[in-house]
Amino acid sequence: MVVLKSEAVLMAELGDLDEVIRLYRSCLLPTNEDHDGLLVELAGLLLRIGALPEAEDVLAEIRSAEAAARVKALIALAEEE
């Protein structure tokens, strides 16, 4: 899992939005019980590469109010920048 997360971070740094989303959706999310935690990470990576609409889509999938609040805060910061 650490290798997949590292690869996702590298793809984010390279600006490969599709690969970041693919890694999370096909590899990380199905095998992890911390679904909302991974979605928060995914939203953060998407915001890092300027993919605000995609991060907002991820927000809609989050079930926990606490995790959703974290992503809303990240989105608000990204909108200010």
Image (spheres, rainbow, N blue to C red):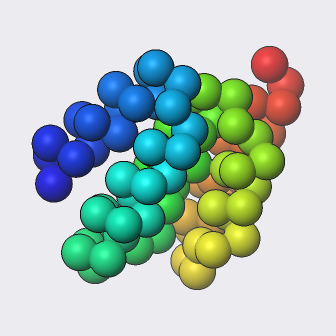
The x and y percentages for residue 25 are 43, 65
The x and y percentages for residue 78 are 74, 30
Quadrant (top left/top right/bottom left/bottom right) for the C terminus: top right
Is 29 above or below relative to 73? below
Is 45 in front, or is 19? 19
The x and y percentages for residue 67 are 55, 64
Image quarter for residue 52?
top right
Residue for point 27% across, 44% down = 5
Residue for point 70% across, 37% down = 51
Residue for point 26% across, 73% down = 32
- For the image, the number of numbered tags is 0
Residue for point 84% across, 31% down = 79
Is 11 above or below relative to 5? above
Q: Is residue 48 left or right of residue 22?
A: right
Q: Is residue 25 left or right of residue 60?
A: left
Quadrant (top left/top right/bottom left/bottom right) for the N terminus: bottom left
Is 69 above or below relative to 62? above
Is 63 above or below relative to 8? below
Q: Which residue is the extreme one toward the right? A: 80
Question: Is residue 73 visible from the viewing direction of this image?
Answer: no
Q: Is residue 26 left or right of residue 46?
A: left
